[in-house]
Amino acid sequence: MNRRVAIMLGIGLLVLAPWVLPESLVTILNYTGLFSLVALGLVLLTGIGGMTSFGQAAFVGISAYTSAILCSSFDWSPWLSLWVGLGFVVLTALLLGALTLRLAGHYLPLSTIAWGLSLYYLAGNLKLLGGHTGLSGITSIDLFGLPIDTGRRFTYLVWFMVLLAIWAVSNLLESRIGRAIRCLRGGRSMAAAMGVNVPQIKLLVFVLAAVLAGVSGWLYVHFQRFVNPTPFGLNYGIEYLFMTVLGGAGYLGGAILGAGIITLLREWLVEYLPALIGQNGNYETIVLAVLIIFTLHRAPEGLWPRLASRWSGRQERHSPLSSQTSIVSPLPKRETHPQRGTPVLRVSHVTKRFGGLVAVNDVSFELRAGEILALIGPNGAGKSTTFNLLSGVSPASSGEVSFLDQNITLREPHAIAQLGMSRSFQHVQLLPHRSVLENVAIGAHLRGSAGVARSMLHLERVEEQQILQEAQRQLDRVGLGSQAQTLAGNLPLGDQRILEIARALCADPCLLLLDEPAAGLRLQEKQALAKLLKQLRTEGLSILLVEHDMDFVMGLVDRIVVMEFGEKIAEGLPEDIQGNPAVIEAYLGSVQ
Ligand code: ADP
Ligand code: MG
């Protein structure tokens, strides 16, 4: 079934549902909508952004309580209190995010449990918030003079919000910021090297997820017209995560599916289980837990991709981006390239220690504009480590690196990328489940300027088109143009390396760092790559290359720096290096 038709059909069913469904099912539909909003935030945060949170219910609560107090005690209109509530949510998320998002591994989920618990106890103990008895008599939402005070009316409001959220989030995900968000899971250092401010993007995703939870809280409190701490405790925080994972944490549709299934099942189990078992006792939670474990065994990615593939006969793919739809003006190019022959990169006495291991020891060299310099040496010589400290991935322990006359020794990778340095990685870093074109477009991150709001409203079409067109141009240039729509993970390894070069070129750099670009290429492909690199040199680009293949290096580069055991042992023209006894010793002495 066509995606558009499916969406229209879904909306049609939603319009009809409140009229044909019995009251009890309308209530379930309403709760599904409320939960979907929170789960949608979790798809963004956990499924796509890779940050697990058990604490989303707290954000639902912050917004719900703020609105409840403002409307019941101060007689505010719910529409006004929505903004104040969301303001509190954003502030709290910024604060919590700044404190906890740096935490690595399991510490982030653990800290979300901590704040998930705290709101529950805070609300339960504060007189102002009504303690465990809660607050009642809260006004209902008024929509153009129509009070949203029945379940059926509420269905329209809540589902309008859900659809609006899905539209905005999916627009966002298909923008330059969306590509940056997708890198958060498994591609952070790559994204940073392409100029993405990773901590900022993490915080952004965190705040957006909190805002979606906040909208749900606002709707909830004005629908129930009553509030107490129970729905905002850790239990609900865990259940939101269950919904998301069960539905499919990587898919927007998964949020709705998961919310719907759990809401419906819980309702049925609460109704029928006591009769079946013969006694009361919250057994539904146990049955749900078993069902979830069983389902995740069979469908680890959640139910949505299963369902979607059955529907359309293939694995669900997000709308394939195309660069061919219309021709737009190209992205502006870098205004000035450094004068040929002037120093671009100066490395002075840099040392990098990993505990007791000195991976790079007092290395100095210089790279001039329009030059290809090779960094060679046996495995473990410290070449990749040198790359990492030039590009800011791991800063030098001592020494100084300057790029275009600026000291970049301790700068963040995204700030270095901004100056015009772009790189590829020895171990390819790409988004395997996204198209080749999208992967390359990540490289153009710094050449776009659309922010969150413009992206969500899809007002950045021209810029987005320009970026995709540029990505296509770079793919054509490296000879991968025909593969633009292939999933990057399906490319052979050699082509994935070439993709990384196209991505780096997309940034319009003046210095290119390539870590073993020819590894895994066949002879013909190596020749094509050498031709491309020579062409780039002619255009004024400077290139620093790590390479093992001597034949490839000798015919291509202007100068060579040789490293062994972290130290520079030789530097010079290719023909001099070839005959250098220390180099021959280093290479023959180690097994390549
Ligand atoms: P090359 O790229 O020349 O093959 P590397 O720069 O990858 O060599 O590694 C140089 C040395 O530093 C090796 O001994 C390697 O084990 C060590 N090393 C590299 N990265 C790290 C790290 N993050 N932590 C500890 N040791 C490291
Ligand atoms: Mg290496």
Image (cartoon, rainbow, N blue to C red):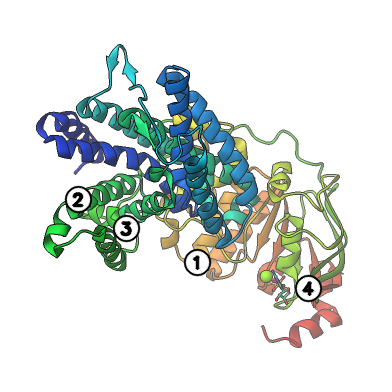
- Which is more N-terminal, label 3 or label 4? 3
- Which is more N-terminal, label 2 or label 1? 2
Mark yes or no: residue 158 visible.
Answer: yes
With 265 as the anchor, is 392 left or right in this view?
A: right
Residue type, label 3:
Gly
Kindly indicate the quadrant of the structure image that contains residue 332: top right
Q: Residue at left 41%, top 62%?
A: 490
For marks 1 and 2, give the CA distance.
32 Å
State the residue position of label 1.
Answer: 493
Q: Which quadrant of the figure shows ligand 2?
A: bottom right
- Which is more N-terminal, label 3 or label 1? 3
Mark 3 Cα shell of 10 Å, populated few (<14), some (14-19), many (≥20) = many
State the residue position of label 3.
Answer: 302
**In this view, the mark in front (1 or 2):** 2
State the residue position of label 2.
Answer: 311
Q: Residue at left 46%, top 29%?
A: 461
Numbered circle sitting on residue 355: 4
Residue 9 higher or lower than 383, as above or below: above
